Image: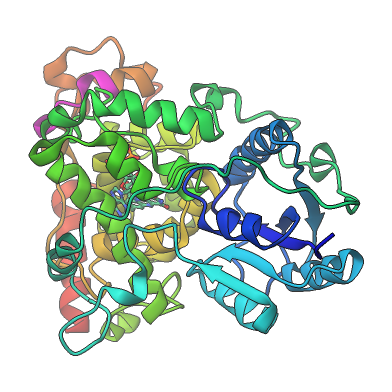
């Protein structure tokens, strides 16, 4: 029998449109492996909410592989060391994997050398190929979209291989249950039961969203309704590929806005390819001089949803309870931390990293730096979102009622600004800072770095 090959699975936990699986299945008996690597230097270790998702997604993938008479081998430790060890144990000659762009994965890929065969498949188009006229990566999203859209639609997704050849002998696997990925006491993930991780659920969600995509342009901005696809954790873990999402959601011209959002994910990958430290370094260096406030108390109030700004608090509580936050509210809450509280965006990035089920190095950094104004493509620093105006404009009354029960009894007119309307109940905090005062302070801080 031919020597086996490893299939190294990371943020691509699926069987459909899995080019590395297809290539491996043509190359020899396949040993699918997932390495829980919390050791890579500089790695953003998998956050707590992601670990919850990962547990269930691996469970689901293991089941899908078993249905194909294959298995998922689990190992824990430095990915390069574990894969090298597995090659020695099994006699595997090659490792097939989908290419990823997080700096720690690029380092691991380089260290594995010639035995690693990389395949594109987690983006609408190979990230290195969408370039400016002079061959560089795009720094501005709108120009990126123009170039990417000329290559669209993406290639057709690949089917699941009819069979996955198995090796004569399977190497040992660790037990998922021993990894302790799920919270125990206290179990903060009870509200995560809105999610069903795994490939089948991801595909079902994309199919269901296809019926709603025409309304997305309008509905996506309204946090009170379920107007977006909620595919982000599924794309983060690669339970579905963006090519598949594009083709399943369909929608022709009515899906343009949706496709443009999906393309942000590809754009973000180009940014971290160009600037691997984007998760911790300002895109515009002049912001290195910005005088951030250090206030653990204000940071904690923001994290816990106790700022006294209902729309911000609703978002932060939705995040804590479910591992996800509506995009419009992410922007408002992020802007509030950076501009109103003048707290370094990196504190927000870290909190989101730990609490989001869709936490994604590129998407998180690009969006935080966009909102903060520190990014290479970013909002101007002087653009300071007014949370109360945003809350009214995007009709967030129902959303606030759902996530801030102390305010549930207030009428729509008072709920966005209970303090200003004399309706603040005793158990809800007064605003941590007035909007006008915060705005002046932020503008002054911005002027000082120019
Ligand atoms: P939809 O609106 O249905 O969009 C479809 C898909 O397109 C998403 O699943 C996502 O993969 C992609 N997408 C949409 N908007 C963006 C965007 N602005 N940037 C990059 N990709 C996008 N998204 C993450 O996936 N991970 C993160 O860690 C993350 N952190 C964020 C931090 C901040 C401060 C902000 C403002 C936004 C962040 N986003 C992040 C982007 C966006 O909020 C989420 O992708 C979106 O809310 C997910 O919900 P959805 O799947 O219903 O999105």
Q: Decide: is 10 above or below 288.
A: above
**Quadrant in which residue 273 is drawn:** bottom left
Compare residues 385 and 240 and report the one nearer the observer.
Answer: 240
Q: Residue at x 23, y 23 (%)?
A: 211
Q: Decide: is 183 above or below 402.
A: below
**How far from the left and from the top, in percent, is residue 240?**
45, 42
Residue 252 appears in view: yes
- Left or right position of 354 against 410: right
Compare residues 388 and 377 and report the one nearer the observer.
Answer: 377
Q: Quadrant of the C terminus?
A: bottom left
Compare residues 427 and 148 and report the one nearer the observer.
Answer: 148
Number of residue marks: 0
Q: Is residue 396 magenta?
A: yes
Residue 9 appears in view: no
Q: Range of the magenta residues?
A: 392-399
- Left or right position of 209 against 123: left
**How far from the left and from the top, in percent, is residue 42?**
61, 74
Q: Quadrant of the N terminus?
A: bottom right
- Left or right position of 106 against 33: left
Q: Is residue 400 magenta?
A: no
**How far from the left and from the top, in percent, is residue 255?**
15, 39
- Left or right position of 165 against 433: right
**How far from the left and from the top, in percent, is residue 418?**
21, 25
Colour convention: rainbow
Q: Residue at x 73, y 67 (%)?
A: 79
Q: Main secondary structure of the magenta part?
A: helix
**Quadrant in which residue 447 is drawn:** bottom left
Q: Residue at x 20, y 64 (%)?
A: 148
Compare residues 286 and 433 and report the one nearer the observer.
Answer: 286
Q: Can you name the residue that lies furthest to the front here?
A: 1
């Amino acid at each position: 029998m031919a020597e086996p090959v490893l299939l190294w699975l990371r943020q691509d936990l699926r069987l459909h449109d899995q080019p590395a699986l297809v290539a491996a299945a043509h190359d020899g008996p396949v040993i699918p492996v997932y390495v829980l690597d919390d050791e890579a230097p500089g790695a953003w270790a998998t956050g707590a909410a992601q670990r919850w998702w990962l547990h269930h997604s691996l469970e689901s993938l293991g089941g899908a592989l078993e249905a194909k008479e294959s298995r998922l081998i689990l190992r824990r430790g430095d990915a390069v060391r574990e894969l090298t060890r597995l090659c020695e144990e099994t006699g595997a000659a090659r490792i097939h994997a989908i290419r990823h762009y997080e700096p720690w994965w690029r380092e691991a890929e380089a260290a594995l050398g010639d035995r690693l065969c990389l395949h594109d498949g987690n983006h609408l188009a190979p990230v290195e190929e969408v370039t400016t006229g002079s061959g560089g990566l795009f720094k501005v999203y709108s120009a990126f979209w123009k170039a990417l859209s000329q290559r669209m639609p993406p290639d057709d997704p690949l089917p699941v291989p009819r069979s996955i050849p198995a090796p004569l002998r399977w190497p040992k696997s660790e037990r998922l249950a021993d990894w302790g990925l799920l919270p125990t006491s206290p179990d903060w993930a009870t509200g995560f039961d809105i999610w069903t991780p795994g490939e089948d659920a991801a595909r079902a969600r994309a199919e269901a969203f296809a019926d709603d995509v025409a309304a997305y342009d309008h509905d996506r901005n309204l946090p009170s309704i379920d107007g977006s696809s909620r595919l982000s954790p599924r794309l983060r873990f690669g339970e579905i590929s963006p090519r598949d999402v594009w083709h399943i959601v369909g929608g022709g011209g009515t899906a343009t806005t949706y496709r443009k959002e999906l393309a942000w994910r590809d754009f973000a990958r180009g940014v971290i390819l160009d600037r691997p430290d984007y998760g911790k370094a300002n895109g515009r260096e002049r912001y290195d001089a910005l005088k951030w406030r250090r206030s653990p108390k204000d940071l904690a109030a923001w994290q816990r949803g106790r700022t006294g700004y209902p729309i911000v608090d609703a978002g932060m509580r939705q995040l804590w309870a479910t591992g996800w936050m509506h995009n419009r509210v992410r922007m408002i809450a992020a802007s509030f931390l950076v501009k109103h509280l003048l707290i370094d965006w990196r504190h927000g990035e870290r909190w989101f990293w730990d609490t989001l089920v869709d936490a994604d190095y590129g998407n998180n950094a690009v969006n935080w730096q966009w909102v903060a104004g520190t990014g290479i493509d970013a909002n101007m620093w002087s653009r300071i979102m007014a949370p109360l105006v945003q809350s009214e404009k995007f009709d967030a009354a129902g959303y606030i009622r759902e996530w801030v029960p102390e305010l549930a009894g207030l009428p729509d007119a008072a709920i966005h600004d209970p303090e200003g309307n004399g309706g603040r109940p005793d158990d809800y905090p007064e605003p941590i800072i007035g909007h006008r005062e915060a705005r002046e302070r932020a503008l002054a801080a911005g002027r000082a770095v120019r």
